[in-house]
Amino acid sequence: MKAEDEQAFREFVTSQMASLRKLAYMTCGDWHTAEDAVANALVKLYPRWRKLERPDLYAKTMVYRAAIDERRRPWRRERSAGEALPDVAMRDPAGATDERLRLRAALEAVPPRQRAAVVLRHYLGLSLEDTAGVLGCNVGTAKSQTSRGLAKLRELLAAERINLSGGPVEEWTSAIA
């Protein structure tokens, strides 16, 4: 690879690393698995770098697929000792930490494809067309997956009538839409 292409790849990775890690984490729910998925995707992206028109969408597609693949690997099915430990969080005055934990737990209960659609559209802010490109489907399918994912997320969050910070769930979940 030429020096200027290599420099462009480095700049791309530097600028997109946080976004790619967030996508992988929101897809698989584990930071270690997410980092493995991003690393594997970037290794596969490097040789194709010069041929890509939209490397950002291609990288997101690869990270999404790598995160799904990492969760399917046999050694990931084994339970670690850390999974048996309870999550204990200290309450912060505003209740933001509790709400993030609650949202994370609800997101993990949403089916993976719907979760990915919601994350791509509402967390990463991709357009419907870009979301469809990352998921490898048409725009209508991406739209329905996003809609169903949001509905499932609202249903899970509304299971408790009062959120952990004390306010009604309806106010909090309207911010997701």
Image (cartoon, helix red, strand yellow):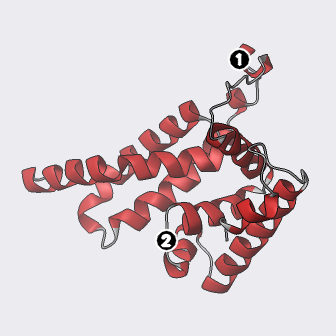
Classify residue 120 as left or right of residue 52.
right
The kind of residue tagged 2 is Leu
Q: In the figure, 32 relative to 159: above or below?
A: above
For this rendering, which residue is in front, 172 or 120?
172
Reading the image, the residue beneath label 1 is 82
Reading the image, the residue beneath label 2 is 126
Q: Position of residue 157 (x, y in %)?
A: 82, 55
Give me the residue at 51% from left, 42% from top.
37
For this rendering, which residue is in front, 8 or 125?
125
Whether residue 85 is visible to the viewer of this picture, yes or no, is: yes
Whether residue 68 is visible to the viewer of this picture, yes or no, is: no
Question: How far separated are the C-alphas under marks 2 and 1?
Answer: 34 Å
Give me the residue at 9% from left, 55% from top.
4
Q: In the figure, 62 relative to 67: above or below?
A: below
The kind of residue tagged 1 is Gly
Q: Position of residue 173 (x, y in %)?
A: 74, 63
Give me the residue at 26% from left, 54% from top.
12
SS for callout 1: helix
For this rendering, which residue is in front, 96 or 69?
96
